[in-house]
Amino acid sequence: MRNILMIISFFLGVNCFAQIDIEKILKKGYKDIGINYIIAELNDSIRRRYIDLYIYKAKKEKNPYRIVNGYKIGYDYSKDIFEGAPYLDSILAVKDNPKPYYFYYAYAQKAMLCRFKNDINKAIDYYIKSQNIAESLGDTLGVYKVKYEIATVKMNYHQKEEVVEDLIEIYNFCQKNRGKLYENLEKRTIGILTRVLLLLKKNDQAYGYMKYWQERHYAKANVYQKYFFLTNWGIYYHQKEYYKASIDSLAKGLKIHNEYFEHKADIHEIYYYLYLSKLKKNGLGNIKLLLKSDSLYMNKYDTILNQNRLKIYPLLIDFYKQKEDITKQILYTDRLIMLDSIYDAENNDVVNNIKKYDIEKIKKQKEDLEKEIEKVANQKILLVSIISISLLIFIYFLWKKKQKNQLKKEIDNSEGVVEESENNKEKSLSNDVIEDILSKLDKFEKSDSFIKKKYTLQILAKELDTNSTYLSKVINQKKGENFSNYINNLKISYITEILEKESKFRNYTIKALAEEAGFNTTQSFTKAFEKKNKKTIINYINQLVNEKD
């Protein structure tokens, strides 16, 4: 009954926007619905109904994989991540899920939502669940991704020294593995690692990581990553007392933030250091920067990630003290006391939870070590056992050697029979058949069709009205090369001829010549050309030009 109501609701909702043949869509494959309806649709309301239809189809067919995939699509395409949160609960509620990765994903996303709501303890619990699933799946990258997220939590609870160790471990892991996923994790890790080192006043160490990131990752970094590193450079220059450079970097970061980011929760650091750098350089700070930071006081996205904002209040209090504004001094003193008490209470609670997580991790490491010791002991026992029976095995193999030699002779005799049979088969190919195939190949070579169509042995055999076995034998025996080389050499001969006859082709790029000759890639073209002509395409063209001149 519930499914019937769902499809009726879907139909009525969609009918408000367009006439949609629901039965037709239900008959389509999931990939087709995903690409041609959900992704292609620009209207969010209609897209939402296509997602509902995707999930309905999966439930109707009792396909748990497609059900959780539909929920994931629903969350991914939610306009607001908090509104999409029920999809994550739905993923976790699916029984017999054939893809446990979706549980890992759902817990990690729920942890992120909890961090936005400032519920850090629940976020840590979800991270641990996510990490446990990654470990059970043998997903080392997934484990380190969660480790990174937990490190960013630690960063904000006075555990910066521990965070440096964690982040360096993640960085070293990424260094040992190559690929886009590892590079993305490395980019984020270096960003946070640099920030923590700067906050610990370890400027020289931070500088090394910033230079590495700039050389290796800047070109592929997204807007947020570039913004984050501009902020890091601003902090670095401030602490090195290069105040003009600090102001320039922070101003660029502020411009990017204002232009691209809707939420302002992570901007306190820029306001704080921009104010201080201007104060140091000009002898006067811009109080508007501190007031902007304070204006985010009630922002729902202003989570514990921004506890460093507390640093602005002593500056505000001092400013209004100089202005002899008692009312403002009291206002910002009260605000500092209140926020400090909130952070202090949360800090103790969260730190205890993090310590519990770390202790559990240490216990697991201890268990792993004990298992390793037991494994080594078992291996020693096994080794002794192997040595004890090795002589018996050796004697056994000596006894079997004669039988193996006899078997080898039988196999050799068998191969001789097969070879003789194959030779007889080759001899059975009549001269008329060979001449007929050669004649057809001659016409094929003159037609130049080999540059317009991707030929396989089977396709050409069908086109020449013969079978692939005969065609392959004739090409091998009469042309002296295999089919692949035969086609490639025809293409190279063609392009060589037009290069000699028509000068305009000598001005073509290598890529254009490769396409003209019918090659799919420049690399395969240059390799085939050099193989046939014993010189590179560049050298060959230069030689032609010199000869014509």
Image (cartoon, helix red, strand yellow):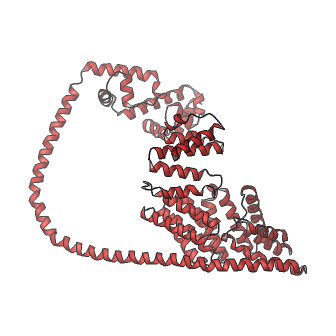
Measuring 55% from the left and 44% from the top, which residue is drawn there? 5
Q: Residue furthest front?
A: 1
Asked if residue 433 lies left or right of residue 33, the reply is: left
**Residue 9 pos. (x, y %):** 59, 43
Measuring 51% from the left and 45% from the top, which residue is drawn there? 3
- Is residue 105 visible in the rendered structure shown here? yes
| Front in this rendered view, residue 360 or 48 | 48
**Residue 160 pos. (x, y %):** 61, 77
Residue 395 occupies quadrant? bottom left
Asked if residue 271 lies left or right of residue 519, the reply is: right
- Is residue 53 visible in the rendered structure shown here? no
**Residue 379 pos. (x, y %):** 27, 73
Asked if residue 308 lies left or right of residue 353, the reply is: right
| Front in this rendered view, residue 427 or 347 | 347
Asked if residue 289 lies left or right of residue 173, the reply is: right
Quadrant location, the C terminus = top right
**Residue 181 pos. (x, y %):** 53, 57
Q: Residue furthest right?
A: 324
Residue 138 occupies quadrant? bottom left
Residue 371 occupies quadrant? bottom left
Measuring 57% from the left and 62% from the top, which residue is drawn there? 110
How many labels were placed on the picture? 0
Residue 14 lies, with reference to residue 177, above or below; the image says above
| Front in this rendered view, residue 418 or 305 | 305
Residue 520 lies, with reference to residue 51, above or below; the image says above
Residue 225 lies, with reference to residue 383, above or below; the image says above
